[in-house]
Amino acid sequence: MQEIENRLFGSLYATSACSNEINDTTAVELLAAPGTNIRYLITDVMVTNSNTSSGSLIQILDGDNNVLWQGYAAAESGWSKNFRKPIVVTSNKSVKGKCGSTLATDGAYICIAAIKDIPDRS
């Protein structure tokens, strides 16, 4: 994984990351826990599945493995979602992604965009 951006917008930081190939059911960290009193607001997710014969349910999880969003990526397909109302992740929780089934060859890739937010600015 690599964090692509980390830009300041007022007191908010935009950040994004893309996974390496995922071809089993192990959850992979996309965004590390941001720190005490900081939370992620997930704005966009893009998934591609390069497997030629199998599809898989792709899940976006928080650091406690709670499902935040999921969608099916058919073989040689994918999906993307822009959240007009961002998904709010509990403070100081990482964001993970995983396949719901094993893709023996050519796996899935997950890209995510989020905002680092400080919920209590008082």
Image: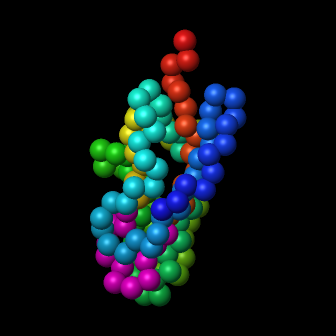
**Residue 38 left/right relative to 8:** left
- For residue 81, above or below residue 99: above
x, y percent for residue 64: 30, 44
Number of labels in the image equals 0
Residue 102 shown in magenta: yes
Which residue is drawn at the image coordinates 60% and 56% (left, top)? 4
- For residue 43, above or below residue 100: above
x, y percent for residue 113: 58, 51
Examine the residues drawn in magenta and state their main secondary structure.
loop
* Colour option used: rainbow
- For residue 68, above or below residue 25: above
Which residue is drawn at the image coordinates 64% and 28% (left, top)? 11
**Furthest residue in direction top, as rendered:** 122
The quarter in which the C terminus is drawn is top right
- For residue 56, above or below residue 37: below
Residue 117 appears anywhere in the view: yes
Residue 81 appears anywhere in the view: no
Residue 57 shown in magenta: no
Nearer the observer, 78 or 89:
89
Which residue is drawn at the image coordinates 43% and 34% (left, top)? 35
- Report the magenta residues as a range: 98-109
**Residue 9 left/right relative to 57:** right
x, y percent for residue 52: 47, 87
**Residue 3 left/right relative to 20:** right
Q: Quadrant of residue 56?
A: bottom left
Nearer the observer, 35 or 28:
35
x, y percent for residue 7: 66, 42
